[in-house]
Image: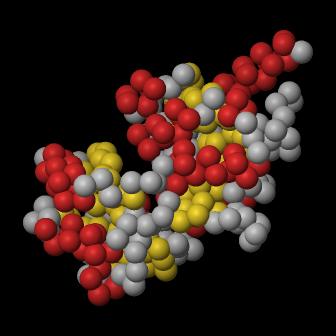
Amino acid sequence: MNLKNYLIAIDLDDTLVTNFDKYDEKSFSLLKKLSKDNYIVIATGRPFRSSKYYYDLLKLNTPIINYNGALLHHPKDSTFPKKTLHIDKKLLLKFINDNQEIIETVFCEIGDNIYLHKNNEYVGPYLHTDGGNLTIGNLEKSLPGNPNGAIVFSKIGTENHLIEYVESEFKGNIKIRIWHANEIVVSELYNSLTTKANALKEVAKYYNVPKEKIIAFGDGHNDIEMIKYAHIGVAMENGHPDLLKVAQFSTKSVKESGVYHFLIDLLEKNQEKH
């Protein structure tokens, strides 16, 4: 291995993991080897409870970026300066009340506690309830504080309305990110400061890693800032079109072990230099 003291940030879903639970064994094996001389950091939209398995599988001893950067913490070092970002509960409740006719349901999290407005057929795969406490009921009564963010489910055709509402009502304090799954619109409401890039900057500062030694892999719209920030920003070839526009490099899909192949090529080029 010829990479040393690099900071390598890796997204999970559709970068290292498919269908929520099938992981890319070749890439995991290589990352595990690289972790002996480098800082491997998981950067995911998932909560910690559903990323801990992969953190442990890689035998990491580094911080982890959860909720797309709304939570940065070190599972094995309580002295690491934990960072958390939230959205205002009052604003979230206003959003739900003003849009109740088009919203199917909403759930949000505070740490690993999950608060679901009402159950329905779409929400199950997104909850990651293992290791988390699930409370179902009107968020006005059940939500005890400001959540790290919120996931909203609505019908196809509601996208523009939701975007316009968030932009006009929240004036940039809360942002919205939208994607589609199983004939439903899924939206993420998040603090305007929440990005994987901001969290990764904190990790780089903590370990004193210069930008020229930062590598990042991702596939989604939520990876854009991180990929732009990294010295070597890599998008999966089947990634979000907006991500592919800003990424310096692309690699094969997770099913073809894209992370593995890119890192192997990088290792070979580094060896040629030396």
Q: Residue at x 52, y 55 (%)?
A: 69
x and y, in percent, of residue 94 in the image: 20, 71
Evaluate whether residue 22 shows in this view.
Answer: no
x and y, in percent, of residue 210 in the image: 73, 36
Residue 190 falls in image quadrant: bottom left
Q: Residue at x 50, y 26 (%)?
A: 247
Q: Quadrant of the N terminus?
A: top right
Whether residue 235 is situated above or below residue 186 in the rendered picture: above
Q: Quadrant of the C terminus?
A: top right
Whether residue 161 is situated above or below residue 262 in the rendered picture: below
x and y, in percent, of residue 264 in the image: 74, 24
- Residue at the outermost bottom position: 141
Residue 82 falls in image quadrant: bottom right
Q: Residue at x 64, y 52 (%)?
A: 202
Q: Residue at x 13, y 61 (%)?
A: 102
Residue 260 falls in image quadrant: top right
Q: Is residue 232 left or right of residue 86?
A: right
x and y, in percent, of residue 207 in the image: 77, 49
